Image (cartoon, coloured by chain):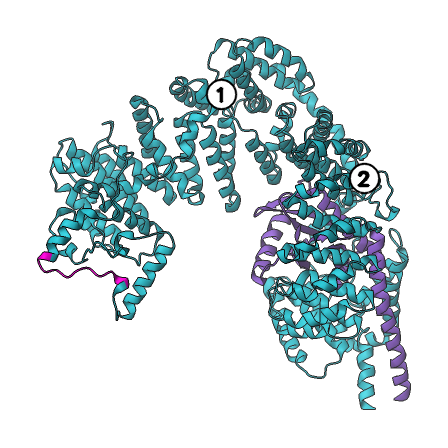
Chain colours: A purple, B cyan
Amino acid sequence: MIHFVLLISRQGKVRLTKWYSPYTQKERTKVLRELSGVILTRGPKLCNFVEWRGYKVVYKRYASLYFCMCIDEEDNELEILEIIHHYVEILDRYFGSVCELDLIFNFHKAYYILDELLIAGELQESSKKTVARLIAAQDSLVEAAKEQRSSISNIIAQATK
Amino acid sequence: MEQLKTIGRELAMGSQGGFGQSKEFLDLVKSIGETRSKAEEDRIVLHEIETLKRRITDPDIPKRKMKEYIIRLVYIEMLGHDASFGYIHAVKMTHDDSLLLKRTGYLAVTLFLNEDHDLIILIVNTIQKDLRSDNYLVVCAALNAVCRLINEETIPAVLPQVVELLGHSKEAVRKKAIMALHRFYQKSSSVSHLVPNFRKKLCDNDPGVMGATLCPLFDLITIDANSYKDLVVSFVTILKQVAERRLPKSYDYHQMPAPFIQIRLLKILALLGGGDKQASEKMYTVVSDIFRKCDSSSNIGNAVLYECICCVSSIYPNPKLLETAAEVISKFLKSGSHNLKYMGIDALGRLIKISPDIAEQHQLAVIDCLEDPDDTLKRKTFELLYKMTKSSNVEVIVDRMIDYMISINDSHYKTYIASRCVELAEQFAPSNHWFIQTMNKVFEYAGDLVNVKVAHNLMRLIAEGFGEEDDAADSQLRSSAVESYLRIIGEPKLPSLFLQVICWVLGEYGTADGKYSASYITGKLCDVAEAYSDDETVKAYAVTAFMKVYASEIAAGRKVDMLHECQSLVEELSASHSTDLQQRAYELQAVISLDKHAVENILPSDASCEDIEVDKNLLLLDNYVQQSLENGAQPYIPESEHSGLSNISNFRSQDQHEASIHGLRFEAYELPKPPVPPRIHAASLEPSTELVPVSEPSYSRDTHQVETAASISDMGSSELKLRLDGVQKKWGRPVYSSSSPSTSNSTTPNTVNGVTQVDGAVNVNSKTRSTRDSRKPQVEISPEKQKLAASLFGGSSQIDKRATSANHKVTKAGIHAPEKAQAPKAAVVSNQVTVEKTNHQPSPDLLDLGEPTVASTTPSVDPFKQLEGLLDPTQISVTANHGAVGTTESPDIIGLYGNASASGQSSSSEISLTTNRDDVNFTVGLVDATVSTAHAGTTLPTQFPKGLNPRDSLEKDALVRHMGVTPSSQNPNLFRDLLG
């Protein structure tokens, strides 16, 4: 099971956190501090796993962003590495060559996508297409709402002229 | 009219700042991005919290604005601040009819609330309603929340609906419903009647639903594999179909057919096939198929291969599959990637349980990993070594572990590895002397982290010796322990637990062999007590040790000359705040003033192993009590039976009660039958009165409570001498309390092999080790490694062979040599050396190998280099592959790292501060453009452009530029495509 997902920038700034196991706010801060200390200082050629408090943290660096997932002792690290990559690929498709800035300003969208990929700390969907379809369906609702709104605002604008 | 105007303005607000969010929010994100210190960031966030607190309570905020506030709250919470003031608004938002707002509400509550939060009860109703919605997206949003928020109490409220949703027409809903049920199952046992649903959903025609069903099934099978044996065939069939690419193409991942589903199935098969030959036989074909089909050049292929190895190592062994698994492992270990090496070491650890000889082929690779600078890899390798420890290689392995333990700071892992060392030492120790040396090191460097039990085991070992009737060896062991402790005692900052052991041993055996005088030992103990003056337990141990040393002096008929500093220490302690210390000091003074005969009775020398009979009913006091009663004394009324007690004594009895709950039963005083008035202690004139403990239920520290308990129970024995004995026995308690670890010594193969040999081995060991250590710096690396390899792997097999058939040694080794031809030559050389050595030495010690191997250094250098040469090409190819897959390791990105580091810590200063309020007009003028880009940004993804889309990036670039973020500034990394 995945206990939490963290996105940390190279400077140690938090870009996204998702906790699947219960942690208090205090514990969260501590985990973030501890792990960013460990992970950000690791050399580039070392392995992408860190053993930490009886768990394992799998991380991968994309440009200046670190994607980290904390898993149980008996989980398959290489698989988690690929789940991270899977997520990044989906983000990439969604944002169209995703960069850190996209995630900074659209972190809630990154959350929505993550929610379609993982649920309760397990991988729920391994097909990129299915995830993409669901997100698109949700976004089309947003679009519809926007159009409706702009037409209303036009009417108001005309009426108040 | 006015109202309509505001609505219009609000509607326009939403798209003002680009990225579909308001300018205000983007400014916040930007300003936080610009901060250079945590303090600055905190200041901004606190200001933002103030703003939000003020605004969010406004009764008529437009919903759209509210949505943005909620997202801002999420942002604050993500940065580690408390946004709990806004939780209720997030909950309210989930009630909204619009899916847009509802979705935001659900996202926020799932991020904010843990399942035990009070507000959840307010959401349950909404969730119930939403689960019934016609819109499947609403249902999905609700199910997401269900997985995170529903706890054991609220499960019944949503359970029927979730079960119903298993039959929903949309696969996304079915899938989430399965995951929700899985979550329920994890949380509560009340849903176990739903287990058949999981079985049914395994046959769902959507692969996504089927894949999701594997999660709960895996959990169920972990708990009880036997009830699911009938599914073996189904799982095998599914796995076969997946491997044959029968699933839709969209489940392919990097040219592998549905690898995540394959991995899950393999995990399940591993559980089902464990120890079940019949079930395992059904799996052999499909597993070997997957082995064959897996692409070992991609990371995901290796993930599946690794899972295959795990499966093979846990199902009923099949030689052919094991062979394939071993091949894959050697590929992993030879790879240049640290990840694969790590997995290889892990896999080796799994396989080694079934076929122990496979480690031998990889000895050099394992040693490379052990010496790798990467801590993760190193720890994994220690894990492997732990699994393959035998009595023959325990010394090398534990030495290595201790060296590593000394070098790290991480206390979690230090504790872990210290306990591993202790465990291995207790299980496989070749000699007691070595055991003590090892324990000393563990205590010295990780003393505060090891279990107290370990210290007691060590004391018992020293007290009991070999467990055989060999007194000479026992006393030799003790005097060597004493010597080593006297050496160590001067070191600064020893852990408390270790000092306790030292004090105990010095007290018991410090003067036993006559080598050291009583004043020397007590002087040392005195130094300890003074150096660690704030550690009461150590002081207590030291005082008791004084008493024992002086007692043995008196018993031997020598005059006791208390050192001046001891005297002042004892005087100081007799006025100590700690009643325990005080008591000990008085006891000491009392004992010293006694004559030889009394002392011999009170503290017989070397009696820590004798059993003590404990008379719990204190029958010995009956006469005395009777007498007192006849003389007109008040009968004793137990405290609990006192009526009209003051508050304080109520407290005390409560305390006492609590203490008894915690396992410390002061039975002697709880029983109402034999009344002992507490007053008699003061009246009594016996010299041992100080010893009879005044009941002190309010002792705060556990150790003290134990001690009191001990002396109370000791008091029960029938003779006077035993009362005082108790003082000594406190420290000896573990000696007779249980019978576990040190006895394991006699069961190790070593003692079986050569009982008489042990004595000699002690000296040989220490000698060879010291020569080896002194030689270390001059010897080249490769012989060093060979030596290590020989002692870890080669040597072990030799010893085993010797155990089974001592006569066939040479021939057997001869047969083995060609077998190892594919293994590195160097290892063979060292192995042969081992053979030679074992030939003319009946009791080969591993460390004896040192000298001959050194002699053979020169020929072994070449093969090692060859080996390295062989490794190189694979390394290159692997990294090349990585590049092809598209990971970050590609060279241009590494160049960027350099760039970033050049810009130093000025992290996100690229976002310039140009956007001020005056710019608003300008920005508003650009609204249209922004809207269009925002549209483009959201509509484009529906077409899913593959790879880099130039138009897209241009638009993004334009957007961020007019927000004041320029790619040309110091941190271009923010603009770098994550996928390179």
Is B502 located above or below residue B193 in the figure? above
Residue B640, x across and y down, in percent: 28, 63
How many neighbours does mark 1 have within 10 angstroms: few (below 14), some (14-19), or many (20 or more)?
A: many
How many neighbours does mark 2 have within 10 angstroms: few (below 14), some (14-19), or many (20 or more)?
A: some
- The kind of residue on which mark 2 rests is Thr
> In the shown orientation, is residue B219 left or right of residue B694?
right
Residue B823, x across and y down, in percent: 67, 20
Q: Secondary structure at mark 1?
A: helix
Judging by the rendered image, the residue that carries numbered circle 2 is: B237
Using the image, name the chain to which the residue with label 1 belongs.
Answer: B
**Residue B128 image-quadrant placement:** bottom right
Query: Nearest the camera: B242 or B859?
Result: B242
Quadrant of the image for the N terminus of chain B? bottom right
Is B279 located above or below residue B8 in the figure? above
Which numbered disc, 1 or 2, marks the residue that appears first in the sequence? 2
Residue B174, x across and y down, in percent: 79, 57
* Number of numbered tags placed on the structure image: 2
> Was residue B631 drawn as part of the magenta stretch in this picture?
yes
Query: Nearest the camera: B29 or B692?
Result: B692
Is B553 located above or below residue B251 in the figure? above
User: Which residue range is magenta in the image?
Assistant: B630-640
- The kind of residue on which mark 1 rests is Leu
> In the shown orientation, is residue B195 left or right of residue B395?
right
- Label annotation for residue B847: 1
Q: Secondary structure at mark 2?
A: helix
Residue sitting farthest toward the bottom = B1
